[in-house]
Amino acid sequence: MTDYFGQIRNLKNYINGEWVRGENTVPVINPATSEEIVYVPLSTKETVDEAVKAAKQAQKEWALVPAPQRAEILYKVGYLLKERKETLARLLTMENGKVLEEARGEVQEGIDMAFYMAGEGRRLFGQTTPSELKDKFAMSMRVPIGVVGIITPWNFPIAIATWKSFPAIVAGNAVVWKPATETPIMAYELAKIFEEAGLPKGVFNVVFGSGSEVGDAMVHHPDIRVISFTGSNDTGRMIAGECGKQLKKVSLEMGGKNAVIVMDDADLELATDGIIWSAFGTSGQRCTACSRVIVHEAVKEQLENRLLEKIPELKIGNGLDETVKVGPIINQAGIDKIKSYIEIGINEGAKLLTGGKQLTKSPFDKGFYFEPTLFTNATSDMRIAQEEIFGPVVSLIPVKNFEEAITVNNSVTFGLSSSIFTQDVNRVFKAQRDLDTGIVYVNAGTTGAEIHLPFGGTKGTGNGYRDSGIQALDVFTEWRSVYVDFSGKLQRAQIDIDE
Ligand code: NAP
């Protein structure tokens, strides 16, 4: 077994500043090699209770620490992440499979988020506003909610946790985080960093375990007042239903079926690069991955040829090799899902231009690798053009004009990201108005969000909240309106006003 940089074999939960309860472990597999990297505990509901109790206690004190001082800890976290960027990136590649370059990018997202949210320690703006009455003062301010439950997927094991925990913590909440079972190492590393940065015990807690036990216990825990979830649509819907019954605040970031639109006036070389990067980067396992290309029929053939020329240049393999561009799929279940969509696409009548197979021969036989795959002549009603595949599979859908391209883009139940390649400024402005996704790119692929803008989607992708950006604070704070009447007499709003 790879000895995880000679440091650790059995992970433990991080509760109240202590490393506790490492029983009932299962191995974590490197998807590039099938090697066991580390063991992660499958914790129980009782461990969640313990973590929430610690968080609840710690939050009372933490909320009283001035926000600029809370932010000082985040600055330290940012510098520690920066110092360890390379080590963290390598560990990330080992547990998740994404190529090193992208793993470095993901850690950088965490660094950016730390410094950005640390700045909020001196803002956390509310409003002052005039009162309608004499000698009366009115203002609104953000207040923390209490204990926040964070549930995250395996495809961005550190970035998503930082999008959620950093705003929660700077706003004065305490956190209980359940990372995905496939990728616990980033959670362990982030907890170590918080510990070294001097975060008071109990403000940040990690409980490892399955969604059905640990995640479910968090969703149902009466002292967790908000759940921030990123993951699949099915799980998100179920969590939303449970939270609804308890009147618990819930923020959801779920799947996507993102499209690149290529118009007849597009720079085709640029469009090809954008499609390759957003369809096959992270082996298509991004919520913002491009899985549809809506192409004007006049340039369809040219685009197909350009893609067919570039796809074989993508080196597939272990992401620790700097020359590799497409890493493994997370596990065999992920591969099986992709395979089933290849069959569906062929049966639906789309034309398979390249790819479509799992790579099983040496040197790929130990890991979970899938060929970058291109379908063409898909139609927007096909399942391969409607459902999230979460793999390196992209389908070309030919259209006759701009209006049809927008209609096809908006025809899916998801609404995360979309992109358009065109040189026409009128189309650019119409597209950013009419595309119905939370993120719109012009002359770039569908991936690559920056942390100081809101991240999230419409329709089946979310429930109206956003991760990152200033808007992330809306998930982790309540608004309080404060009125101070210094008139010394009873003044009644809406009644004691001069007509
Ligand atoms: P998933 O199966 O829904 O799992 C996400 C998390 O939820 C995991 O930690 C999982 O735990 C937990 N979970 C599962 N069942 C649960 C339950 N009954 N109660 C509470 N928690 C539960 O999703 P995934 O396959 O890991 O992630 C891929 C999905 O995430 C894709 O659909 C992708 O588009 C989406 N995603 C969205 C965004 C975005 O911001 N919009 C970003 C990244 C990914 P265990 O797996 O450990 O059991």
Image (cartoon, rainbow, N blue to C red):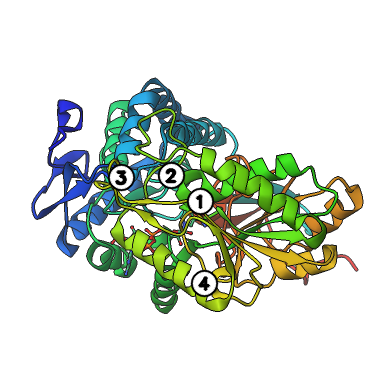
Distance of label 4 from label 1 (alpha carbons): 54 Å
Label 2 with label 1: CB-CB less than 8 Å: yes
Q: Earlier in the sequence, mark 2 or mark 3?
A: 2
Which residue in the protein does label 3 denote? 364
Viewer-side label of 4, 2: 4
Write the residue at 16% across / 28% down.
7
Q: Earlier in the sequence, mark 2 or mark 1?
A: 1
Please state which amino acid type lies under the numbered disc 2: Gly
Q: Which mark is residue 172?
A: 2
Q: Which of marks 4 and 2 is nearer the N terminus?
A: 2
Label 4 with label 3: CB-CB less than 8 Å: no
Which residue is at the front of the view, 298 or 33?
A: 298
Residue 87, image x and y in percent?
33, 26
Picture quadrant where residue 42 is located: bottom left
Q: Earlier in the sequence, mark 1 or mark 3?
A: 1
Distance of label 2 from label 1 (alpha carbons): 8 Å
Please state which amino acid type lies under the numbered disc 3: Phe
Other-residue count near label 2 (Cα within 10 Å), few / some / many at <14 / 14–19 / ≥20:
many
Quarter of image, ligand 1 = bottom left
Which residue is at the front of the view, 88 or 14?
A: 88
Which residue in the protein does label 4 denote? 346
Other-residue count near label 1 (Cα within 10 Å), few / some / many at <14 / 14–19 / ≥20:
some
Which residue in the protein does label 1 denote? 143
Please state which amino acid type lies under the numbered disc 1: Val
Label 1 sits on a secondary structure element that is strand
Viewer-side label of 2, 3: 3
Compared across the picture, whether 6 is left or right of 128 comes to: left
Q: Which mark is residue 299?
A: none
Please state which amino acid type lies under the numbered disc 4: Ile
Residue 134, image x and y in percent?
79, 54
Other-residue count near label 4 (Cα within 10 Å), few / some / many at <14 / 14–19 / ≥20:
some
